[in-house]
Amino acid sequence: MIRFNYFTYALMNTITFLPYFLFIIIGNSYHTILNGWFPLIIFYTFKYTGPFLINSFQTKIKARELLLTFIAIATVGAFCGVLAPLSPMWIELAAVLMGTATGILLPLYTTIQFHEKSFYGRKMKGAHFLFALLTALIIVPLVLFTAHSHYSNLAFLICGIALSICFISLRQMPQYEIAVNPIYNFRVKSFIIFIIFTALIFIIKATRKTDLQIFIVLLLIGSLTVLAILTLMMKKFKVRFHLPKYIHFFAFIQGMTANFFLLYGTFYALSQKSNHFVTYGIYLPYGLGIIFSLFLGGKIVKKFNRIHPLSVISVGSFCGLLLTLIPWTIPIGGFFIGFFSSLQTRTLNRLAYAASESYKDSSLLLRNRWSKLGRMINQTILALLILLSSYLSHIPFNQVFLIVTGKSSQYKDLMFTNLLITGFIIVVSIGILFSYGNWRMKDKTGY
């Protein structure tokens, strides 16, 4: 087994979110555009859209080589962040590199774990998971403490050193005998999705983080443009499914579900409660749900062994969505969604890996891209519905994102109603998608 595997496991599972906090804490301490939020915004944008750019130009490189390549890119990005005191350009470059890399590292690493188990029967043991937890409990506070210190840029140095250790450790991986197609193929659809959603996600994030009203106009124009382009793409390009369709479909819904709770919950907390409620009422229950899912998720699925796991997960996720719409049960809803969304991700990973021999090496990347697509679509729809309901209730556009980000208390009660209406529409829509997916899946799987 690869040396330091518990260390690598811990870092691959924390590097997906740890840089996000770094750019929040450190990014706006430098004189960058958009009131200092530019590094965070471009990190967030490339984390979501980077996988589509990679897929556009990618030859059929094996997951092993891709993993090592993007760990190296993330490492370079971290060391660029160390140089931020010299020029803000370095932290902006760090945001692009780390955003692109961290959006793809976890599915690549999980693929390697599946390869280890499939080819060599090797997997992490209970002690390794314990050591991984202890490692995460050391690295995360250390990085965050350093980020809050006078030498905040050294937090990037700690991340860079940790990533370097992972790179050195993972170079010991064997060459897995996986069939790949070495022919270069430029993917037009993936590149178009990258371009339009990079622009749109950047605008959405900038609208939420700054007071510049021009972004609200760009958001309206951009959202309508994106919907029009996607409609044309669906008519002109035929979508090719390399895995069973229900896997793509449920991956898309999983992305929508998780993103809805985090975005809706944050908007509700900041506009109606406080910053503390964001931490303890939204993110903490969601994180606890993910942790408990690792230990109890499999047991719950086994209790309903006559029902397909995705059907059980659908019911649990939808219950979480309904609880999210009730103000005093939002934390419970967050726990449910964290629990079942994490369980759904792991279930889809297993199903995707086992579904196709020819796409086994890239199956988790496919699943991951569809989840990210669901997240981006949900963000677009949520932003549009909030703006539409605010327009109908006569809330000025320049006040909308000030309210939902906690920068203004005007129209607070009206915004609560608008959020509830918006949430209800999206939850019902996701519920219909869950029902349709389970109905079609029964025809394919026999459950």
Image: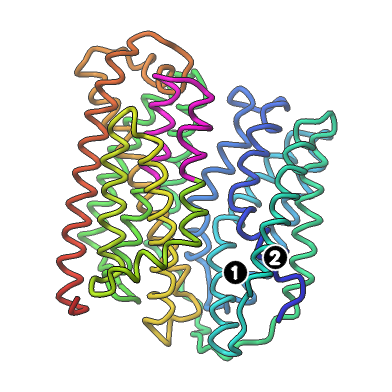
Where is 447 relative to 256, above or below? below
Give coordinates of residue 231: x percent, y percent: 23, 52
Is residue 278 one of those drawn in magenta?
yes
Going from N to C along the chain, the mark reached first, 1 or 2, is 2
Q: CA distance from mark 1 to mark 2?
A: 9 Å
Disc 2 is placed on an element classified as helix
Tell me the chief SS of the magenta region.
helix
Judging by the rendered image, the residue that carries numbered circle 1 is 109
Disc 1 is placed on an element classified as helix
Give coordinates of residue 193: x percent, y percent: 39, 54
What residue span does the magenta drawing correspond to?
258-286
Quadrant in which the N terminus is drawn: bottom right
Give coordinates of residue 100: x percent, y percent: 58, 54
Quadrant in which the C terminus is drawn: bottom left
Judging by the rendered image, the residue that carries numbered circle 2 is 8
What residue is shown at x 27% (from left), y 34% (from top)? 423
Left or right: where does residue 287 sit relative to residue 3? left
> 226 or 347, which is in the foreground?
347
The amino acid marked with disc number 2 is Thr
Check disc 1: other Cα within 10 Å, few if <14, some if 14-19, many if 20+.
Answer: many
